[in-house]
Image (cartoon, rainbow, N blue to C red):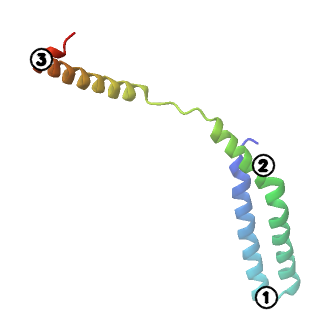
Amino acid sequence: MATPSLSLKLSHSLKTCVHILRGQALRRKDKDLQEDADNFEKLLESEWSHCVSHRSLNSLSASKFNKVKLLSLADELDKLRKFVLVKVSSSVKLLEEQPELQA
């Protein structure tokens, strides 16, 4: 699916349209239109999630899982360099204070 999130957004928009249609039916006191809106909403709920949304969610999940996450290599190397410098300087300082530790 090219744009899996589109079907999820479309489902939300269709539900909004059903709510608007039901409101119009209630204002007009049109029982047939209200029943059609209710039936469409039930159909949307029962079949959309199984036929469309399920595949979209699986596709989104797979693309998220397979997405390569690049680490900020420059930042990581800089942190490593600083850590090593601190360890080296503290080790040198320790050896200068306690020469008996030298092999």
Q: Nearer the viewer, mark 3 or mark 2?
A: 3
| Quadrant in the picture for residue 96 | top left
Q: Which residue carries the number 3 mark?
A: 96
> Tag 1's secondary structure?
helix
- The amino acid on which the numbered mark 3 sits, given as a three-letter code, is Glu
Give the quadrant of the C terminus: top left
- Residue 84's place in the image compared with 51, above or below, is above
- Residue 82's place in the image compared with 47, above or below, is above
- The amino acid on which the numbered mark 2 sits, given as a three-letter code, is Arg
Q: Nearer the viewer, mark 2 or mark 1?
A: 2
Residue at 72% across, 75% down:
20
| Quadrant in the picture for residue 44 | bottom right
Crowd rating for badge 1 (residues with CA inside 10 Å; few <14, some 14–19, many 20+): few
> Residue 67 vs residue 29: left or right?
left
- Quick one: 3 or 81, which is closer to the camera? 81
- The amino acid on which the numbered mark 1 sits, given as a three-letter code, is Arg
Tag 2–tag 1 contact (CB < 8 Å): no
Label 2 or label 1, whichever comes before in sequence order: 1
- Quick one: 100 or 68, which is closer to the camera? 100
Residue at 10% across, 21% down:
97
The Cα–Cα distance between marks 3 and 1, rounded to whole angstroms, is 93 Å
Q: Which residue carries the number 2 mark?
A: 55
Q: Which mark identifies residue 28? A: 1
Give the quadrant of the N terminus: top right
Residue at 24% across, 20% down:
88
> Tag 2's secondary structure?
helix
Picture coordinates of residue 5, whole percent (x, y): 68, 50
Picture coordinates of residue 46, whole percent (x, y): 84, 65
Tag 3–tag 1 contact (CB < 8 Å): no
Tag 3–tag 2 contact (CB < 8 Å): no
Label 3 or label 1, whichever comes before in sequence order: 1
